[in-house]
Image (spheres, rainbow, N blue to C red):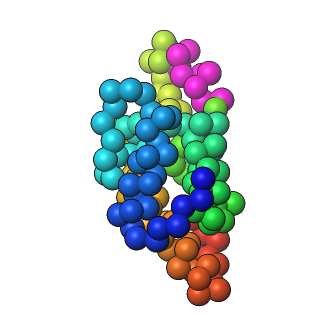
Amino acid sequence: MEIQSRNLKEIGDQILTMLRPIVSRGKSLSLESEIYKELNLRGDDAEDFILAISDAFRVDMDNFEMRRYFPDEGAAIMEWPLKMFGLRSSLDSDRYASLTIIDLAQMITEKIQQQNEGKIDTSL
């Protein structure tokens, strides 16, 4: 799916459209929804989503810092034993930076502008 729009709100709305089939039914989605903390997107699902975003908007997300925003797949395996012993889980949402849908749309908008200007900033 190639996306042509370059307007921030339109990009945000297109991200919402891409998230709807991934996110659990009944979860409310808005531009202010936090992708991990509210929508529980993590691990391989989060990585696949970021790759889909990269393809859809034709932006380079290779340097996107997944671990800054999402726990990896292996963290889920240890969640239950850690909670059983009262230890802090690596899935605790306060360990990860906030990433809302509109934040991601802003990153994409900036990447598109940089690509259009011939300046590629690879620090996401």
The number of callouts visible is 0
Which residue extends farthest top? 84
The x and y percentages for residue 117 are: 59, 87
Looking at the picture, tell me which residue is in the foreground, 66 or 17.
17
- Using the image, determine if residue 111 lies above or below residue 68: below
Snapshot quadrant of residue 42: top right
Looking at the picture, tell me which residue is in the foreground, 68 or 17.
17
Which residue extends farthest bottom? 117
Q: Residue at x 48, y 12 (%)?
A: 84
Q: Residue at x 50, y 34 (%)?
A: 22
- Using the image, determine if residue 75 lies above or below residue 83: below
Q: Residue at x 59, y 36 (%)?
A: 45
The x and y percentages for residue 53 are: 57, 54
The x and y percentages for residue 105 are: 44, 61
Residue 25 seen in render: yes
Q: Is residue 89 left or right of residue 45?
A: left
Residue 8 magenta-highlighted: no
The x and y percentages for residue 80 are: 53, 16
- Using the image, determine if residue 79 lies above or below residue 20: above
Q: Residue at x 48, y 23 (%)?
A: 87
Which residue extends farthest right? 62
Q: Quadrant of the C terminus?
A: bottom right
Residue 95 seen in render: no
Magenta region, main secondary structure: helix
Q: Which residues are magenta?
A: 74-82
Looking at the picture, tell me which residue is in the foreground, 3 or 105.
3
- Using the image, determine if residue 51 lies above or below residue 38: below
